[in-house]
Image: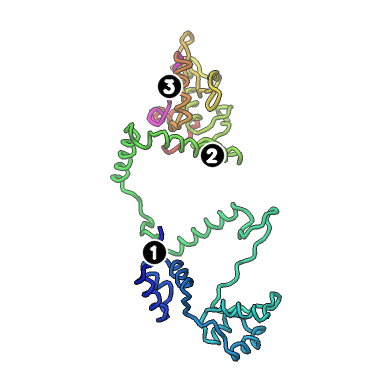
Amino acid sequence: MAKLYTDDDIKLLKDLYEKKVKPDEIAKIMDRTKRSIISKASSLGLKQRDVTYSDEEINYIIDNYDTKNILEIAQDLGRGDNYHNICRKAREMGLTDKSRKKIRHKNRPKPKKKGRYIDGVFTYRKYDSLEDSKKARIQGLIKWHKENEHPRGMLGKTHTKEYRKELSRRLKSFWEDENSYFNSEEHRRKASERMSKTMNERVKKGKNIYSRARGGTREDLGFYVRSRWEANVARYLIFLEKNKEIYKWEYEPDTFWFHNIKRGTRSYTPDFKIWETKESEPYYWEVKGYMDQKSKTRMKRMAKYYPDVRIDLIMKDEYKEISKWKKMIDNWETDKY
């Protein structure tokens, strides 16, 4: 709610205006906004500048209007940078000519760079595409860091092992806490939205949509896999089959459908199907670097719709155990985990 002006406020305002105190300073003194001070002064008829012009000033405006700009005329007449009244006076005298050449004063800001049309759209963008703008920004940052020290003094420094262990411990405790934000519905939803957006962008650009990269057909396997981990697990199964540890295995042979689900995750295809013996019931291996929300949903729906199907998750710890055999397995692809 706006503060009302008391009689004492009005008296103070008049005194300050008479002393030629600037409105922004008056605003600080009276604890009000500059707009409020100017509005109240205008309603009271208070003015700090003389807007009347002598005959000599009028003649000076007429004689110099075509060769000087408004700001220069105002300064020559001792009216400071208050060129707005000069502009009004020139308009009253019929001197305003929009086609006349304007002389930019040295203290005035340079005119804004002209825009242009890109793909039929008018824009002030410096670069033709957002991709070009991003590349230029990255190159600018690289150049800046080569010529300047790190802003926080961290150039060439890394976290200690003790700090990394402590950070790992804290993150694990967050995930284990059921009341943590990491396990909240909001965090899961946002993470799922980010993941979906990232995956869609990768698909549009023809990139591998899996985070462990290196998706493609391996010559030694003869079929397409989505990551190094899947390729190495397949080689491990070949090793087990050769050594009669398992009977046989297949890659993504079966798809399980969730027929009552109309939206979202409606099916699931496990990575590997394994038979330990010729007579035994097969089970599945699913290779996962981490469990995102979509993967958790698949597992929950598999447990609900196919409770008798066994699925073993090959995650970080399981993959480490498999990796112990890598010296005995041909074409093993090294990977940091």
Is residue 21 one of those drawn in magenta? no
User: Which of the two residues, 202 or 246, is positioned nearer the viewer here?
Assistant: 202
Q: Which residues are magenta?
A: 308-320
First reached walking from the N terminus: tag 1 or tag 2: 1
The residue sitting at 60% across, 70% down in the picture is 111
Q: Position of residue 307 (x, y in %)?
A: 44, 15
First reached walking from the N terminus: tag 2 or tag 3: 2
Residue 223: name its quadrant.
top right
Task: Provide the secondary structure element on which disc 1 rests.
Answer: loop
Task: Provide the secondary structure element on which disc 2 rests.
Answer: helix
User: Which of the two residues, 137 or 189, is positioned nearer the viewer here?
Assistant: 189
Which quadrant is home to the C terminus? Answer: top left
The residue sitting at 70% across, 54% down in the picture is 120
**Mark 2: few, some, or many residues within 10 Å (few <14, many ≥20)?**
few
How far, Cα to Cα, is label 1 from label 2?
Answer: 53 Å
User: Which of the two residues, 58 or 232, is positioned nearer the viewer here?
Assistant: 58
Q: Which residue is mark 1?
A: 4
How far, Cα to Cα, is label 2 from label 3?
Answer: 29 Å
How far, Cα to Cα, is label 1 from label 3?
Answer: 74 Å
Q: Which mark is residue 131?
A: none
Task: Provide the secondary structure element on which disc 3 rests.
Answer: strand
The residue mark sitting in front, 1 or 3, is 1
Q: Position of residue 23 (x, y in %)?
A: 43, 73
Colour style of the rendered protein structure: rainbow
Q: Position of residue 283 (x, y in %)?
A: 46, 16
User: Which of the two residues, 57 or 225, is positioned nearer the viewer here?
Assistant: 57
Q: Which residue is mark 2?
A: 197
Is label 1 in contact with label 2 (beta carbons under 8 Å)? no
Q: Which residue is mark 3?
A: 312
